[in-house]
Image (cartoon, rainbow, N blue to C red):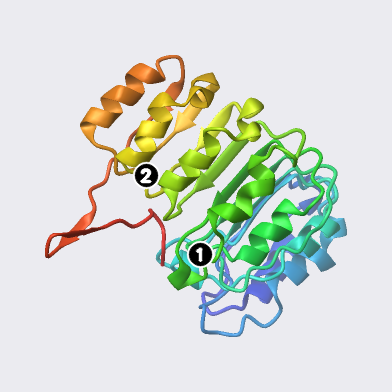
Amino acid sequence: MVVDAEETFEAYFAHFLNRVDTTRVTALSVGCWGESHEDPGVVPRDLLVDNAVRFPQLRSLFFGEFVQEEAEISWIPQCDVAPLLAAFPALEELAVRGGSGLEFPATGHDALRGLVVQTGGLPRKVTTGILASRLPALEHLELWFGVEDYGGTTTVDDLAPLLAGELFPALRSLGLRNSTWGDELVRRLADAPVLDRVGVLDLSGNVLTDTGGEVLATAPAFRNLDRLVLRYHFLTEEMLDRLRAALAGVDLDVSGGEKPDVYRGKATYYPEVTE
């Protein structure tokens, strides 16, 4: 579909509706809708909500699939995404990228099986809204926490209801990613009831050092996992060897080892995605 590069997102979306048989669309990615400093006009969320009847087969939605050349993750202008769930009651997967302006008030949805929220800074009110939602079919939850400089006010304490195993009865895959407090997160997970039913645990992108690695190597809870993903970490080679031995029965991904930034003898650690 050829369109004018200067065309508004609203006009582009109108072309899409006119030229595509949307009754057959099962998966949709909504990408760049304008520069972060520009007024996008009609919010893309509202365009989707207003035309929801035209997408009866939609099961998977990626809302905010900006690439880095279009906008850094923390500059993506987001919104309240709960109306998307209300408009698409059969939706099974929702991925959202960007934390600036993001809202997710407590809601309910009977069909949603996968929820991914990718940010360089996840506000506490978004986390608490998600964890207060009724999502009985949810099998996979993935949250990227980021840093406070970009709105990341969520703390590990805010995850207490989730770690207690009280939420989302169908949950089997959990991603708690991209935080500054990876070592403390691992310590909390070591005796968290949620691991009694989660088979896949993704801790990618966290500031995870040998302090957390020691917990992973010694706590029995992690040996019961089917898969543990630690991609992007600050673990030493010696600790990686210990983890491979201790978690021999677990499908373990420890790729992407990083080194801290060192200035005047002081080491600084950053999660994978911030700005």
Residue drawn at point x = 79 percent, y = 56 percent: 85
Using the rendered image of the protein, determine whether residue 115 is visible from the camera's viewpoint: no
- The Cα–Cα distance between marks 1 and 2, rounded to whole angstroms, is 17 Å
Q: Horizontal and vertical percent for residue 185?
A: 49, 45
Q: Position of residue 72 (x, y in %)?
A: 43, 67
Mark with earlier residue (1, 2): 1
State the residue in front, 86 or 225.
225
Please tell me which residue is depicted at 81% across the width and 57% down the height of the picture.
107
Quadrant into which the N terminus falls: bottom right
Q: Say what secondary structure mark 1 lies in.
A: loop
Q: Is residue 252 visible?
A: yes
Q: Is 126 in front, or is 89?
A: 126
Left or right: residue 259 versus residue 118 is: left
SS at circle 2 = loop
Q: Which residue is mark 2?
A: 208
Q: Quadrant of the C terminus?
A: bottom left
Question: Does residue 196 appear to the left or right of 178 in the view shown?
Answer: right
x then y, percent, for residue 132: 76, 54
Amino acid on which disc 2 is placed: Leu
Q: Nearer the viewer, residue 39 or 79?
A: 79
Identify whether 87 is placed above or below 135.
below
Write down the residue under mark 1.
Answer: 121
- Give yes or no for contact between labels 1 and 2 (Cβ–Cβ under 8 Å): no
Residue drawn where x is 45% and y is 34% of the image: 229
